[in-house]
Amino acid sequence: MLDSFHRPITYLRISVTDKCDLRCVYCMPAQGIPLLQHEELLSFEEITEVARAAAAMGITKLRLTGGEPLVRRGIVTLVSMLAKIEGIRDLAMTTNGQQLARFARDLADAGLQRVNVSLDALVPERYAEITRGGDVRNVLTGIERARDAGLGPIKLNCVIGDSPEEPDARDVAAYGRAEGLEVRFIRRMNLSAGTFSKVIGGEGGDCAHCNRLRLSCDGNIRPCLFSNLGFSVRELGAARAIEAAVGAKPERGDCCTTAFNIIGG
C-alpha cells in the first residue's frame, strides 16, 4: 500500500487496551482517566480479523501496545492468534515491563518475536517518581526473562525532556551498553499541541518516512498519532477502514485530542 505521498504502509500498531498498571507523569494524571467499557474494546477475534485484512493488503509488521498490553486478560492467546497470520514477518510488543517476567516465556512460545521495554530511570526512587509507584526491579527482571525466552533484540524506550545527556537517560544508556541492548530516546510529546520530534536511535517521529497505521483499542484505524482522524472497523469493515486511513494519512502530524492510552504510542 502507498499513501498519497508515496510512502509504503507496512506497519500496524495495535492498542489492545486502554488500561495500564502505571501512571507515568508524562502519560496521564495521577488519578487516571475514564476507561472504556468492556464492550467498547475490540475482541481478540475482531483484532485478528483486522490484522488478517491488513496483512492481505501489505502489512508485514505488527506491534501490540496499550495502555499496557500485559494487563489485557488472555494476551498470550491473542499473540498466538496473530502469529498464525500469513504474511506477518515481525510480531512485537511494547511493554512497561512490570509483568514481563511473568509472561515472557509464554509470549515467546505463542509466537511473539521481540519486545521494546519502557525504562526511564534506573535509580529506584526516580523510577517510582516518574511512574507514580512502579518498581524498576520488576522491569530489570522482566528484561532478563525476556532475554532467556529469546524475545530479541530487546530495545529500551527512554522518555527524556530535552537531551539524552540528562542523568536518568545517561543511566539507561549505560545499562543498555552493559547489557547489549539498543536504547531509543523519545522526547516528551504533547498530542493536543502537536509537539513531537524524531526518536533518537529509532524511526518514530520521522514523518517523511512514516510507514505506520494504528488500530486503537476502541476499533478505529488511525493514520497518524498526531491526528484526530479515525475510521471504524466495526462500521466500515476492516479493509475499507484501512483503505480510508491510508488515503487520509497526512503528510505530517498536527494535533490530537484523543487520550494517548486509547491510541497506543
Image (cartoon, rainbow, N blue to C red):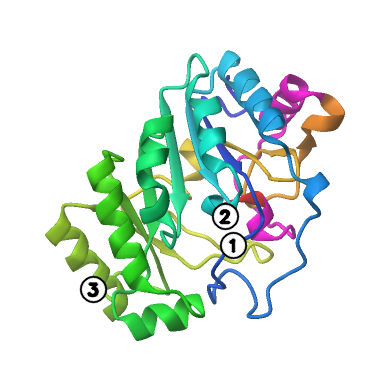
Is there CB contact under 8 Å for labels 3 and 1? no
Residue marked by disc 3: 171
The number of callouts visible is: 3
Q: Which mark is residue 108?
A: none
For discs 3 and 1, the disc positioned in front in the rendered view: 1
The Cα atoms of the two marked residues, 1 and 2, are separated by: 7 Å
The percent coordinates of residue 70 (x first, y second) are 52, 51
Label 1 Cα neighbours within 10 Å, binned few <14 / some 14-19 / many ≥20: some
**Lower sequence index among marks 3 and 1:** 1
The Cα atoms of the two marked residues, 3 and 1, are separated by: 25 Å
The percent coordinates of residue 4 (x first, y second) are 64, 26
Q: Amino acid at mark 2?
A: Val
Q: Residue at x 35, y 39 (%)?
A: 114
Is there CB contact under 8 Å for labels 1 and 2? yes
Residue marked by disc 1: 20
In the image, which residues are magenta?
A: 237-262
Secondary element at image label 2: helix
Residue marked by disc 2: 71
Is there CB contact under 8 Å for labels 2 and 3? no
